[in-house]
Image (spheres, rainbow, N blue to C red):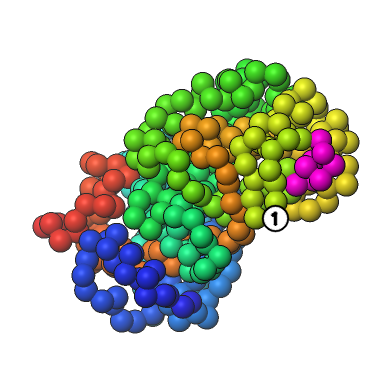
Amino acid sequence: MRTTPLFLAVVLALAGCAEAPAQGCRVGFDIGSSGIRVGATSGDVHGRVSVDYLSDVWADNVIDDTVDATATALRELAPRRDCTALAGGYSAWRLAAEKGGPDKVADTLGELHRRTGAYVFVIPQGVEGSYGYLAAKQQLGDRLTTPFILDVGGGSLQLASAQTGWGTALGQKAWRKLFCAQIKASGNPSCTTNPVGARAVEQSAQILSGEMSAAKAALGTGFAVTAISTPVVHGVHPILASLSQRHAIAGQVDSAGFDRAALDSAIALLADKDDAAILRQLDGCRHGTCTERFAATFVTDMLLVRSFMAGLEVTRMDVAEADVTNVPGILADQRALAWTKAYPCYLVRLRAQGVEAYTSDPRTCN
């Protein structure tokens, strides 16, 4: 896996260390909300395994039922034992630390280390955001023309630049779960969301007001941003393009993105329609995820993106597909390497400090 000088310099700055990367083989695992990806500094290790961590956490606030699957994946995705294995746990793991407590997460990480030899860390939201931006820059190069990216995953949402990152535990699946609970009064995280109702924009903005305030304080307002992930690139954008081509909505939509007025117009058009009616309205849209399988989240995805655009005074969203993984970030992050020399201390700090233990200084361990 090739690492650009810019990518490496920023990650080293992020880690707070000035030394060059350690020599030797390193394998990196991205343990997201829906599975595990792997890569290596040698570039000859690739693969992914699906594991539903969000459902595991939602069941009892603890990551427990997926431990065997995780251990198996960590061993089988990178069978070489002469490499240092660095693994980052992200949105589902942060949620487990918040809901079930960091003690139980630390127990799980200790068990995984004993069974696999991998050093697994719970990565804070801001660090993940920086990993995501750097991975997008590495993939897109000059095609990334905005200072910020938007990455909507299953369990979390990241807004990040090379210098700063902010995120929330409200990705596509998590937002749908919250929408079901708050607006549809349903305890089913996969409830029927459509029709979302005439007040959906107002209700969504109210539910997300706290997130908007936090994002605004961290990032400011009015910046340019590129959406890089599937829910927007292969969902919201092609839907808006299809509706715009048939003059069903107002606003501006082109091959490179869309404006907030187009989102507002599309939501108003679809707000009173059930799944079947939405699919009829989108007849002819066969790009990306414009299919029956994803109909339930078409409008809720729009509401999530629209709320953040409005709250942060973003008038236009560019789109550029990037298969973002956090593997390059953790492979280049010197803090992760430093923690491998003091892993018991990391687990102790995780119990005491929670997720932010990762950003503490491993050199201060006894």
Q: Quadrant of residue 315?
A: top right
**Residue designated by label 1:** 255
Is 336 situated left or right of 195 in this image?
A: left
Secondary structure mostly taken by the magenta-highlighted segment of the chain: helix
Identify which residue, 258 or 91, lies in the foreground.
258
- Does the magenta run of residues contain 67? no
Query: Magenta part of the protein: which range?
Result: 241-248
Q: Is residue 211 above or below residue 114?
A: above
Quick one: SS at disc 1? loop
Q: Residue 38: image x %, image y %?
A: 51, 67
Query: Residue type at mark 1?
Result: Ser
Tell me, yes or no, whether the highlighted magenta stretch contains residue 247: yes
* Residue 301: quadrant of the picture: top right
Which quarter of the figure has residue 240?
A: top right
Q: Is residue 144 above or below residue 148?
A: below
Q: Which one is nearer the viewer's eye here, 52 or 214?
A: 214
- Can the viewer see residue 74? no
Quarter of the image where the C terminus is located: bottom left
Q: Nearer the viewer, residue 167 or 353?
A: 167
Q: Does 229 sit above or below residue 25?
A: above
Is residue 140 visible in the rendered structure shown here? Answer: yes
> In the figure, is residue 8 to the left or right of 49?
left
